[in-house]
Image (cartoon, rainbow, N blue to C red):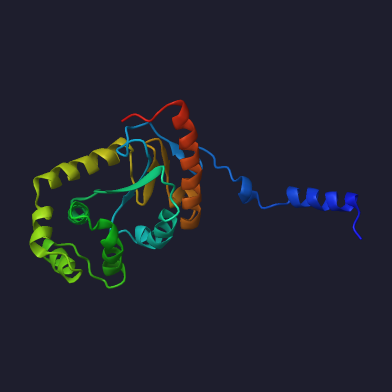
Amino acid sequence: MKTRRTTLAYLLLAFMFAPLAAWAEYTEGVEYIEVPRQPVETGAKIEVREFFWYGCPHCYHLEPVLASWRKTLTPKAEFVRSPAIFRDTWGIHARAYFALQALGMAEKLDSAVFKAIHEQNRFLDSETGLTAFMVEQGVDEKRFSDAFHSFSMEKSLKRAVELQKLYSINSVPTFVVDGRYLTSPALTHGNEEVVKVLDFLLAKAAKERKKNPAPR
């Protein structure tokens, strides 16, 4: 029969050698970078912004991990996306994203676009190819075309370029939490780890918002 002293000894050992992940801390300049704070577009909610490109293989491999993580996202935070436009050829995919967003179908079809490009080898790098694909997915051809060429599209594209310049985005996928903290799988050395860092930064941002509300 174990004595009280033996039981306490076991508890002490368990505490000392418990998984360090339970007290996970991440370091600024290592797993994330603090950037000049920018206004967010999510109001009272903490903004988690992903810069991505449909044609990026790293974004594609991250997508299922990110989709699972988004289901656990606190109601006090909001996930938003910004298509990166590092080259003129990336603009066609940015237009596709914003057109789907305008139609309220981005969240539903993002995964399908990724799979078409990276699993089916459909480059979707022309308006004709994109439109045909969207019709296959049940999107009305005229509505997609109208959204693709809308006046608001030019404004969205311009804003996307402004945001990537403001945050000095030079690779994708990259995340910015609450307009202040930047991280990426490249910094965290893995897709599974990056969502843990996002949780850490969300908690950090929530504490700081109590002291200094985010600019809007």
Residue depicted at x 33% and y 32%:
38
Instruction: State the image coordinates of residue 97 (x, y, percent, origin top left).
Output: 22, 55
Question: In this orientation, which residue lies closer to the viewer: 180 or 185?
Answer: 180
Quick check: can you spot residue 55? no
* Residue 65 at x, y percent in the picture: 43, 60
Of all residues, the one furthest to the bottom in this rendering is 120
Q: Is residue 105 above or below residue 41?
A: below
Q: Is residue 91 above or below residue 110?
A: above
Residue at the outermost top position? 212
In the displayed structure image, the side of residue 156 where residue 108 appears, left or right: right
> Where 38 falls versus 6 (above or below)?
above
Residue 30 in sight here: yes
Quarter of the figure with residue 160:
top left
Q: Is residue 105 above or below residue 84?
A: below
What residue is rendered at 85% in x and 53% in y? 7
Measuring from the top left, give residue 121's x and y in whole percent. Answer: 26, 71
The quarter of the image holding the C terminus is top left
Quadrant where the image shows the N terminus:
bottom right
The residue sitting at 29% across, 41% down in the picture is 164
